[in-house]
Image (cartoon, helix red, strand yellow):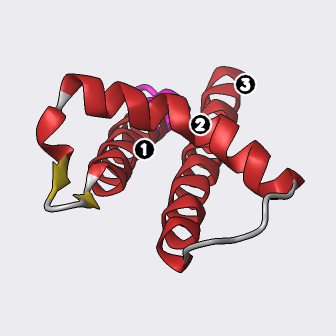
Amino acid sequence: MIISHVIRAFAELFHMVFVFCIIIIFVRSIISWVGNIPPNAFIFTLRRLTDPVFRWVHRKLPFTIIGGIDISPLIILAALYFLDTVIYGSLLDIANSLSMPRY
């Protein structure tokens, strides 16, 4: 019984981390569309968090810049959403199967 609660807690933790990452990528994408924003600590931190991921996607998938438009945030968001759905759902299924009484 306790194991199912621990697994459910890990599922929720993973879900919150994925949602946080999705929000960060989304905010970074919106800010990049706005244009020239004066550098500040928030923008600097946001770029330090997201630029390594964007560079990795650009290195692995060079076609992500089409006509000057960078579609790597869409690819990253889709991958994060997919991983969130698979991991969160799988962990919840495991927790539910452990909490069911066995006869």
Q: Please tell me the numbered disc located at residue 2.
A: 3
Instruction: Name the kind of residue labelled 1 in the image.
Output: Asp
N-term mark: 3 or 1:
3
Q: Residue 14: which numbered mark, if any? A: 2
SS label for mark 2? helix
**Mark 2–mark 1 contact, CB under 8 Å?**
yes
Mark seen at residue 84: 1
* Cα gap from disc 2 to disc 1, whole angstroms: 8 Å
Position of the N terminus, as image quadrant, is top right
Q: Amino acid at mark 2?
A: Phe
Whether residue 96 is in magenta: the answer is yes
Q: Which region is colored magenta?
A: 94-103
Ranked by sequence position, the earlier of labels 2 and 3 is 3
User: Residue 10 colored magenta?
Assistant: no
Residue at 42% x, 44% y: name it.
84
Residue 32 percent across, percent down from the top left: 52, 65
Residue occupying image coordinates x 59% and y 65%: 27
Q: Position of residue 11 (x, y in %)?
A: 57, 37
Assess disc 2: are there few (<14), some (14-19) or many (≥20) residues with their C-alpha within 10 Å of its C-alpha: some
- Mark 3 vs mark 1: in front: 1
Q: Earlier in the sequence, mark 2 or mark 1?
A: 2
Q: Residue at x 30, y 48 (%)?
A: 72
Confirm whether residue 66 shows in the render.
yes
